[in-house]
Image (tube, rainbow, N blue to C red):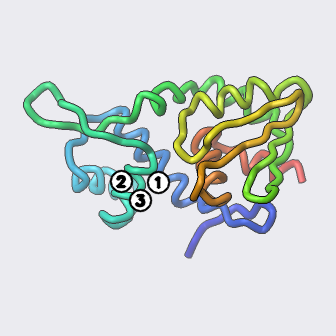
């Protein structure tokens, strides 16, 4: 059964979001050389998934393989993902977000006045594939997904960039 947070009648799959966050954490903290090894680490953290799901998740996260210095290879987050790990900034941004509204395949995020620009800058700086870009005003951000990306995928992406964002918005309603 899917564990969801519903926002505007859309299920934000928290299991997938949690799995993506744990994958990022494991890869950034440990030398993982195979998907089998990563599957074992995930299972040790109480997360189970198939190899096919893991493969799709790695592609979604932009994970690649780099030399490990010992003649083998290890998984590595893309440079954009490593730059986006500024958790203290995440903590400062999430409270200023007031609402998210979907509009014809786009997303509009409302913030406290004066905070849209820095929030959009942070979202763009995360370098996530799903988001082509943002346009910010004083208290409003237009989030533009890439072609072929669903609103559901953008919600998941935002939860990865800004953990707790959907809980924050839900608590305000």
Q: How many marks?
A: 3
Q: Give the quarter of the figure containing the N terminus.
A: bottom right
Asked whether, in this view, residue 23 is left or right of residue 128, the answer is: left
Q: Which residue is mark 1?
A: 19
The residue lying at 63 percent from left, 42 percent from top is 163
Q: Which residue is mark 3?
A: 47
Q: Mark 2 touching mark 1, by CB under 8 A?
A: yes
Q: CA distance from mark 1 to mark 3?
A: 7 Å
Which residue ends up furthest to the front in the rendered image? 147
Q: Mark 1 touching mark 3, by CB under 8 A?
A: yes
Q: Which mark is residue 42?
A: 2
Q: Which mark is residue 123?
A: none
Q: CA distance from mark 3 to mark 2?
A: 5 Å
Q: Nearer the viewer, residue 65 or 169?
A: 65
Secondary structure of the residue carrying numbered label 2: helix
Quadrant of the rendered structure where residue 125 is? top right
């Amino acid at each position: 059964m899917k564990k969801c947070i519903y926002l505007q009648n859309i299920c934000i799959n928290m299991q997938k979001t949690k799995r993506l966050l744990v994958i990022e954490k494991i890869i950034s903290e440990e030398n993982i050389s195979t998907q089998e090894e990563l599957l074992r680490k995930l299972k040790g953290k109480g997360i189970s998934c198939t190899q096919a799901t893991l493969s799709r998740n790695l592609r979604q996260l932009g994970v690649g393989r780099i030399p490990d210095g010992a003649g083998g290879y290890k998984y590595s987050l893309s440079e954009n993902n490593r730059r986006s790990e500024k958790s203290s900034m995440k903590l400062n941004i999430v409270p200023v977000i007031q609402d998210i509204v979907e509009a014809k395949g786009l997303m509009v995020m409302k913030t406290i006045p004066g905070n849209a620009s820095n929030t959009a800058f942070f979202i763009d700086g995360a370098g996530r594939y799903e988001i082509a870009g943002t346009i910010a005003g004083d208290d409003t951000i237009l989030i533009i997904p890439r072609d072929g990306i669903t609103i559901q995928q953008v919600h998941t992406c935002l939860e990865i960039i800004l953990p707790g964002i959907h809980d924050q918005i839900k608590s305000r309603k």
